[in-house]
Amino acid sequence: MNEFALIYELIAPTSCRREDVLLGIGDDGAVVTPPPGHSLVVVADTVVAGRHFPADFTAADIGYRVAAVNLSDIAAMGATPLWATLGLTLPEPDPEWVREFARGLAESLVPAATALVGGDTTRGPLTATVQIIGALPAGRALTRRGARAGDLVCVSGTLGDAAAGLAAWSAAGDGSPYGHALRERFRRPQPRLALGERLLELATSCIDISDGLLADAGHLAEQSDCAIVLEVARLPLSAALRANCASEAALRLALTGGDDYELCFTLPPTALAALAAPGLPPITPIGRVEAGRGVRVLAPDGATLAFERTGFDHFAAAD
Amino acid sequence: MNEFALIYELIAPTSCRREDVLLGIGDDGAVVTPPPGHSLVVVADTVVAGRHFPADFTAADIGYRVAAVNLSDIAAMGATPLWATLGLTLPEPDPEWVREFARGLAESLVPAATALVGGDTTRGPLTATVQIIGALPAGRALTRRGARAGDLVCVSGTLGDAAAGLAAWSAAGDGSPYGHALRERFRRPQPRLALGERLLELATSCIDISDGLLADAGHLAEQSDCAIVLEVARLPLSAALRANCASEAALRLALTGGDDYELCFTLPPTALAALAAPGLPPITPIGRVEAGRGVRVLAPDGATLAFERTGFDHFAAAD
């Protein structure tokens, strides 16, 4: 089996079909029709074995993950995903592995109606880069730059679960349903696409939480040239996280644990009610935007808390 | 230095600016404006250390290469490149290395007016995936599928040089100008963008020669459902290749050596004259399209030659 057969025969059939794909996998490039009156959003993210997932992650887990983290970036921009390409480097052309990888990839891309239109398969250490192109109404964009003093800071879903799930990944004998739920949060992050599209009309800034709330809220503050003040008592913690971790540990995970892929966004307080709608995840206001800079976290008594680490950094983190 | 700083501070400033880039590197995604009335072409290629280049390739060589091989795919589709993303995995966040990589990347992208709009930098074994989006007039595409019996088969430039350059890469003491010229063909492939754009109007099928002429002409034959007959006496060989290799070895490199990144295309004989134009590379007719299937190579006496290998295959090739 050669590299072409790998893509053509195993991965290509798992893609959904879109009428705007004029020419898909199998030529030097794909040909697609951009929707008229729209801007395009382009995102690219890489996952690396030994770095972004545990050693016992399955091929399907890896395929799902590399697509989902990109879809999460598309969601954070308020865009609708359209087409994806894949750069897959793997040590051996094991058809069973590739088939499982493709299954996981499709598990993420197909519900998002995103067609895989091309890519490259090469031999080497296990690495996968996905790039996704999405669409936005022309002239609109949901960026990190628009937060204004007086806005609420909100997050979707619950925080800290994925980091707790990763920590519990290889915990021997943890057969509790809570441990399973947390591991699933790490293993199958849910890109918040419907929410992102809604936020395009409502939010002033947005980011997806991949590196941890403090780090990612910090990007909003820095790029919006404002301060963000978070109240620790407001952080949404799941029942599973509360059951698995002591209170302080749970808060630390919620603030600094990565991989939740929830959205953190800012919006005027009057816009909040519009987000209580069917099909959207629970939204929790966790703080506010002020003049100034940086991120502060307030304890229930109003005191400012200090943290050593602000999140996950691929190069700064210890190996 | 963290992963963000690597991209923001070292790579981003080397990108050219385009007015259709509304939001570049630094958010969850880039926002770009597609040209009205056009289709888009999407390509993605990966280069892996120890697989696609010699161990002593410099960071600039690697950066140049990963962009150039993608631009070559854009050229083979007859498209005009617009925007690129980069997935870069590297063992250490060495600023000097990244600066050199970015210099090589820009050396390839800037003359092609292609803006780097985003990407991801991760730690791991050295791998780089670039994805480029280009534009085509809507409804047009130069694919591998349109060759027709009676068409000429042509190639641009000369063949076999890059493979000879790679073979001579670490030949001790080879300070000859010919050896240098061949190594440069491997080290700095020239995407045939102007030719590809012209071929969009003239050619019936096209592919870039990355895996070797026989393998790539085989893709044209297979996907166009026709036979391709090549005449060995017509293959364009450079003076450097002739000076460095015995006649038979030179022909073998021209037929099966990869990495030339010339274009191989088919067109009606009457269209050939339009390709003798300023700004385009030399074009050589090397054979014809017939009814049937597969690729045959004819010796000067008309006998059919047999070859063991048809080109480069990442997984089939010996490690």
Image (cartoon, coloured by chain):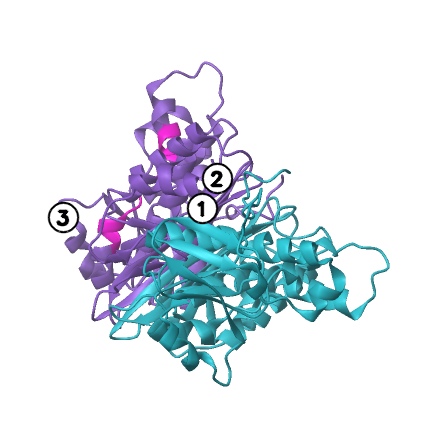
Chain colours: A cyan, B purple
Circle 3 sits on which residue?
B277
Mark 2 or mark 3: which comes first in sequence?
2
Closest to the observer: B77 or A90? A90
Which residue is most to the right?
A: A173
In the rendered image, the quadrant that contains the N terminus of chain A is: bottom right
Measured along the vertical axis of the image, is residue B52 above or below residue A128? Answer: above
Percent of width and height locating residue B257: 46, 40
Left or right of B19: which side holds A229?
Answer: right
**Residue occupying the point 26% across, 50% down:** B193
Q: Amino acid at mark 3?
A: Ala
Which residue is most to the front?
A: A301
Q: Report in which chain the residue with disc 2 lies.
A: B
Pointer 1 and pointer 3 on the same chain: yes
Q: Amino acid at mark 1?
A: Gly
Q: Report in which chain the residue with disc 1 lies.
A: B
Left or right of B122: which side holds A92?
Answer: right
In magenta stretch: residue B192: yes
Percent of width and height locating residue A268: 35, 71
Which residue is most to the top?
A: B173
What residue span does the magenta drawing correspond to? B182-196
Question: Could you tell me if residue B160 is visible in this image?
Answer: no
Q: Amino acid at mark 2?
A: Asn
Circle 2 sits on which residue?
B2
Circle 1 sits on which residue?
B212
Within 10 angstroms of label 2, few (less than 14), some, or many (20 or more) residues? some
Measured along the vertical axis of the image, is residue B265 above or below residue A116? Answer: above
Closest to the observer: B175 or A199? A199
In the rendered image, the quadrant that contains the C terminus of chain A is: top right
Local secondary structure at mark 2: loop
